[in-house]
């Protein structure tokens, strides 16, 4: 039995799974967000596990692309977990679907997250692994994918980056390398136009915003170094909530407040702290993006 909240018709549409590390690099954040955004603009539904880190970025990218997303929870619907994803949990039922095999209100356990991975895999035609260690939740998802005989794509990463070990070994073992959204869309018979969407196939592409796509493509991603990782580990709760909703593309401060569910004063204080720590950058017009 599955409990659901949102649009059940999404289960009848072409679905791609995008998963990755809970402690990603800025490179992984950028790739997961943009892959999900382009998949959504091409008419695909993006499914992930609502974990902090790259799962959350995949859900956010799909929504920002004007598309739909499915979140498979490791707890019951109505449980605010993880707390930094509360804004996503509130918005997805209006623009997607929440699914769980656990009764409403049931708290998560260390066993519930590996178990929910099989549901993610069962829904998806193919899986994109952005980052993850060779042993962990992401590798558990890959095993389920292999058991069902479905396609796995992996994002190449630096050989000295621990969270790149999983995808790099998947490629070594025969997974499709993910280099552009076309590598993903071709599994659905779609053609990427280089900006946003498809020429034919699973659904109508959303409207292209050329300025946003060009701006996102021009920023080279930079992996988190030890100093940045140390800064992240010391984030207060408000800072963590804000950092989780900042994207590689500029977002207005009012939109960030809405996403994070914070009062303006708290949001601005958190943004200032994140900016001092070198994690976010402020642009003209009260816009903020991830630092690169």
Image: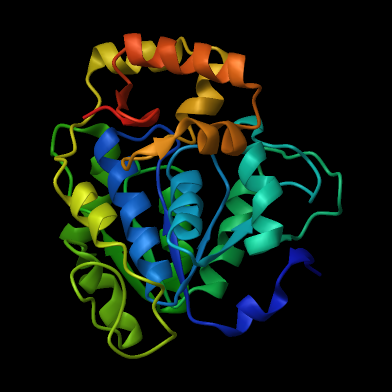
Q: Residue at x 35, y 51 (%)?
A: 32
Q: Residue at x 46, y 9 (%)?
A: 234
Q: Can the viewer see residue 73?
A: no
Residue toward you, 151 or 280: 280
Q: Is residue 78 left or right of residue 173?
A: right
| Quadrant in the picture for residue 146 | bottom left
Q: Residue at x 14, y 32 (%)?
A: 160
Residue 239 percent across, percent down from the top left: 51, 18
Residue 202 percent across, percent down from the top left: 42, 86
| Quadrant in the picture for residue 220 | top left
Query: Which quadrant holds the N terminus?
Result: bottom right
Give the colouring mode of the picture.
rainbow
Q: Residue at x 21, y 62 (%)?
A: 178
Residue 203 percent across, percent down from the top left: 44, 85
Query: Which quadrant holds the C terminus?
Result: top left
Residue 157 percent across, percent down from the top left: 18, 45
| Quadrant in the picture for residue 190 | bottom left
Count of number-bearing discs: 0
């Amino acid at each position: 039995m599955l409990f659901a909240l949102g649009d059940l018709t999404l289960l009848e549409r072409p679905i791609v799974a995008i998963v990755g590390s809970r402690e990603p690099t800025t490179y992984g954040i950028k790739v997961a967000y943009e892959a999900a955004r382009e998949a959504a603009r091409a008419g695909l539904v993006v499914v992930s596990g609502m974990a902090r880190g790259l799962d959350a970025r995949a859900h956010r990218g799909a929504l920002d692309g004007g598309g739909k997303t499915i979140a498979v929870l490791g707890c019951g619907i109505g449980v605010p977990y993880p707390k930094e994803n509360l804004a996503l949990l509130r918005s997805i039922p209006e623009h997607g679907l929440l699914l769980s095999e656990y009764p409403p209100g049931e708290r998560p356990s260390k066993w519930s997250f590996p178990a929910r991975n099989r549901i993610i895999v069962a829904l998806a035609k193919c899986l994109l692994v952005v980052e993850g260690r060779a042993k962990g939740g992401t590798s558990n998802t890959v095993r389920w994918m292999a058991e069902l005989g479905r396609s796995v794509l992996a994002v190449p990463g630096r050989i000295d980056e621990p969270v790149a070990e999983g995808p790099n070994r998947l490629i070594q073992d025969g997974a499709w390398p993910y280099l552009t959204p076309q590598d993903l869309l071709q599994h659905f018979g779609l053609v990427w136009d280089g900006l946003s969407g498809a020429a034919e196939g699973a659904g109508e592409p959303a409207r292209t915003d050329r300025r946003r796509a060009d701006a996102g493509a021009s920023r080279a991603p930079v992996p988190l170094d030890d100093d940045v990782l140390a800064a992240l580990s010391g984030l207060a709760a408000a800072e963590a909530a804000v950092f989780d909703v900042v994207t590689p593309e500029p977002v207005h401060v009012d939109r960030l407040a809405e996403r994070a569910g914070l009062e303006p004063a708290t949001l601005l204080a958190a943004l200032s702290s994140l900016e001092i720590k070198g994690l976010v950058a402020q642009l003209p017009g009260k816009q903020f993006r991830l630092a690169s």
